[in-house]
Image: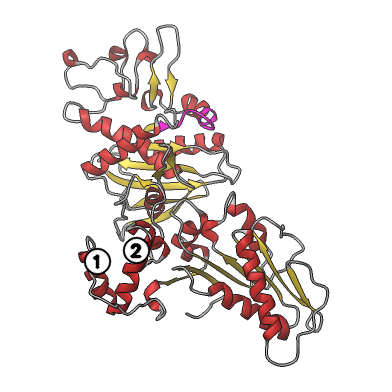
Amino acid sequence: MQSTGRDIIAKARQKGFSTYKIAEATVKCLGVQGTRAVLISHESRATQRLLDRARFFLKHIKGPKPEMGRSSRNEFYFPKTESSFYIGTAGSRSFGRGDTITDLHISEYAWWENDAIAHVAGLFQAVPKNGRICIESTGNGMSNDFYYMCTNAEKLGYNLFFRSWWEDEEYSVEPRREWAPEGFEHYFQDMKTGFNLTEAQLYWYWLKLLEFRMDLKTMQQEYPSTFEECFQATGGSLFPNAARVKSGYWGWKKKDEYRVNYLEGHPDSRRFTYVIGADPSGGTGNDDAGVEIICLETLEQVLEFKNNRIDPVEFGWFLCALGEEFGRAFMVCEANHHGIATHSILVKNYQKNRIYKRHTGLRNGKPSYGYMTTQTSKPALVGAIRECLGMGLVIYGSDTVNEMKSFEEDSRGKMGSRSDNLVIALGMACVGAIHYARYKKDMPIPEHSEENRGTNFMYYTFDDCFLPKKKEDSLLPRQLN
């Protein structure tokens, strides 16, 4: 494996990357003028072990003893080359404007607690274009920034490497007796043939699996055979079989200065009907706004959009424009949090009978627009996605699939992931798609006329967009929950 200057390494345990990087940084500080090396670990005990290794290298290096200048508990200074090497714990020191780092190594990034992105933001910006960044870690599920960086390495300008357990000869033990991987025979046979493993390697793996009390999920996370095994769900994965359908027709274009991913051939409102699912955000950079559009006739994802800088009011205008472009598509948008501001734009500027209503208005009242997203209502969205997948929903967007893979339910029943805005938006679009499927045999989708509005058109809900063919078979207004 050759370093490229911007590297991400997913690996099995005890591969020695941090030790190698300490040795590399030490040598560079001793020989290259103006080196500023930084190594950041995930917790204080690991940091202390790394510091001990650095001191060991300096003490036992061949040749003249290195000349050391002022040094703190975590930093070594080399006056001859005016270089320094800092080893610390995530969050213990802030790096930012005014700092220059020539060599940055991030260790066990998947295990950084609290806000990992906030910790590394200053670090990354302190590395110039000709500097070097290496991020390495064992896996820790999918709800962390390391998983995001691995799955988006190419987009971020990084080279992704994977180091499996079986690539090192030390992970082997010669069997001293007859043995068999009871209960895992097929799995071991697949490993043997797939990776050309020896009996000693398989026996080592079996002993480790026994140490993990036969918990294959944990074993695969700690000692993965493939890149995918690094990222075992830490909770209960709600979409374990999520997979992207590769298609040459899935591309991107600009819409109101924003990038959207779309399926070629859409929109075509003369042939197709569409439903939009939308999850607003504050537009501050801390959270993404998400949009998913599904074609109701073909049950395909035709548009995917996420952006963390579009504020909820602008998002409302953006949705209005998308809705019109897609033939006055049906709109299901989050109502709470930032959705309050988004709906203030939608209800004034978009066709009201195309907007989801969770409650109808009384004769002298107003309806309640939008879908309330809470931990209580999330299971309904998850159920809607699962139902649509069972009906044949086709997903093309890799961002959507990545969020689905990391969307989990923890031991307390809480659902979510580090980033789940596209999942929430997809769930809302699926609510509309399912409703359409229930009634599409009976009806075209006409505009409401004065005749079928009744005495108060505000009484009609999202369901009333789907009118029966015969007036005498008209549906009573229903609520979507």
First-in-chain label (1 vs 2): 1
Would you say 312 lies left or right of 455 here? Answer: right
- In the rendered image, residue 306, in percent from the top left (x then y), is placed at 47, 47
| Residue 197 in sight in this render | no
Residue bearing the label numbered 1: 181
Q: Quadrant of residue 425?
A: top left
Q: Which mark is residue 209?
A: 2
- The residue range painted magenta reads 332-342
Residue 358 vertical position relative to residue 97 in the rendered view, above or below: above
Residue at the spot 56% in from the left edge and 34% down from the top edge: 313
Distance from disc 1 to disc 2, alpha carbons, whole Å, reads: 9 Å
Q: Are marks 1 and 2 in contact (CB under 8 Å)?
A: yes
Q: Amino acid at mark 2?
A: Leu
Residue 302 vertical position relative to residue 451 in the rendered view, above or below: below
Indicate the quadrant containing the C terminus: top left, top right, bottom left or bottom right.
top left
Q: Residues within 10 Å of mark 2 (few under 14, many from 20)?
A: some
Residue at the spot 59% in from the left edge and 65% down from the top edge: 106
Residue 90 vertical position relative to residue 226 in the rendered view, above or below: above
Indicate whether residue 436 is drawn in magenta.
Answer: no
In this view of the protein, which residue sits in the foreground, 330 or 242?
A: 242
- In the rendered image, residue 318, in percent from the top left (x then y), is placed at 49, 39
Q: Secondary structure at mark 1?
A: loop
Residue 252 vertical position relative to residue 128 in the rendered view, above or below: above
Residue at the spot 26% in from the left edge and 38% down from the top edge: 387
Q: Secondary structure at mark 2?
A: helix
Would you say 398 lies left or right of 178 here? Answer: right
In this view of the protein, which residue sits in the foreground, 251 or 391?
A: 391
Q: Amino acid at mark 1?
A: Pro
Residue at the spot 82% in from the left edge and 77% down from the top edge: 69
- In the rendered image, residue 20, in percent from the top left (x then y), is placed at 57, 78
Q: Can you name the residue that lies furthest to the bottom here?
A: 63
